[in-house]
Amino acid sequence: MNRTVAALAASILILCACDSGAPPTGSDQREPFASRYQPLPGTTTLLRGGTVLTGTGERLENADVLLRDGKIVDVGTGLTADGADIVDATGRWITPGVIDVHSHLGVYASPSVDSHSDGNEATDPNTAEVWAEHSVWPHDPGFVAALAGGVTSLQILPGSANLFGGRGVTLKNVPGRNVQDMKFPGAPHGLKMACGENPKRVYEGSGPSTRMGNVAGYRSAWIEAAEYREEMEAAERGEGEAPTRDLRLETLAGVLEGEILIHNHCYRGDEMSVMLDIAEEFGYKVGTFHHAVEAYKIADLLAEADTCAAIWADWWGFKMEAYDGIRENAAILDQAGACTVMHSDDDIGIQQLNQESAKVIGAAARVGVDIPPERAVRWFTGNAAKSLGIDDVTGTLTPGKMADVVLWSGDPFSVYTRADRVYIDGALVYDRSTPESNPVTDFSLGTSSLTGGAL
């Protein structure tokens, strides 16, 4: 069987496994667009004798990780399991699966052409009614490339043209015929907001055209959402009729109820502090600031608010609000006890979040700050899971959590290291040694001889 046929057969088997027709455990099928994700079948697997970074701040040498029934069963030394697939991890490193909290795969799909540009509903400053998942093209080759970089889960967000860009969706990085086959079961929705230059540039002809106009737009929207919420609550108490259903206000009210997380595109420290003030005014929480180039200037405020900062290692200077970026940003945040996350916002960067984190480790070392691997790994595992509200089920190698695991060829913070094996819910979904068996998207079939993901 040639590689293309083998890859096609593997993809069909994966899709059949996903489309079993049974609702995932714990899902509520009454919810609109509920997850249809089904874990792929896996085998009991024992990764033996590797350097283990648990994602909780621990580093274990010559340790084992046992996976069974889609879960982490145990982490330690000298583990055994009858009938397990034994994988020699000597000289290799084991971490939780990589999680990217800011991706546009599927909504700005590859190849980058106008017909694939579905990330920004740039028709109104407030488009809280739209959902990114209704734009996701599951056959974007970028998903497979990200898998080769160890990415097991990712959040797909709308773009940053609007004050309120719409809902994001968290996915498991597995093939699916429909985005609901990939949708992370139980993950809360996020609401994308944007500060600063983008919305005022997009709407400079009609407004808002200034930062003060941006803030007025946020506050007006929250006032309207609070009134909508009050009317709904009054109707539930039998004190009048419920308002006409409004998708935009439904999303905003979900934030006020604490059911939908805020993911806020924001670069400047002063703007982030203003957004924290608005959140206090209307009684909601900012979950994560994205890009957050100047987060180091307000690290104490972020730690106090328990708000994550999702950042790049060294993207800066491409516009004025990105001018004060420094490579030590993540190090300063981490030292202040703030929730620090490394994100991509890029179809190439998503493949190397581990190496982006290594840049920060190096920059910190040059100014006398030591950040060990067991601490930095949290930036793209445990902290990222916290940002997405899924840290109770993934993000660390904790017994009982999803067996989303990467076996690396060496130290994941080395530029020479690659992901050797990637497991999602205990199923081997990527194996660098057998590229012919790795997933390949429908789009890639017939357009490329490469079926193994990233180069």
Image (cartoon, grey):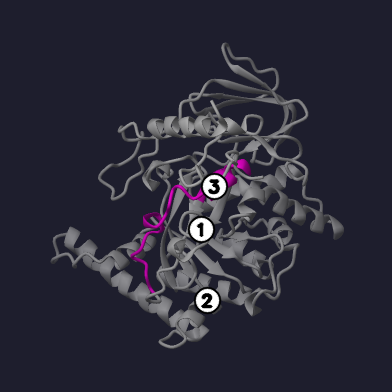
User: Is residue 356 depicted above or below 249 in this figure?
Assistant: above
Question: Seen in the image, is 300 located left or right of residue 168?
Answer: right
Q: Position of residue 164 (x, y in %)?
A: 42, 70
For discs 2 and 3, the disc positioned in front in the rendered view: 2
- Which residue is pictured at 52% across the width and 37% down the height? 439
Q: Residue at x 53, y 35 (%)?
A: 4
Is residue 388 rendered magenta in the image?
no
**Can you tell which mark lies on residue 104?**
1
- Looking at this view, name the residue that lies furthest to the bottom: 205
- Identity, as a three-letter code, of the amino acid under mark 1: His
Name the one closer to the observer, 417 or 72.
417
Residue 407 shows in this picture: yes
**Left or right, 411 with reference to 72:** right
Tell me residue 56's x, y (percent): 64, 40
How would you rate the neighbour count of disc 1 (Cα within 10 Å): few for under 14, some for 14-19, many for 20 or more?
Answer: many
Q: Could you tell which of marks 2 and 3 lies nearer the N-terminus?
A: 2
**Which stretch is magenta?**
126-154
Percent position of residue 305, x then y:
55, 62
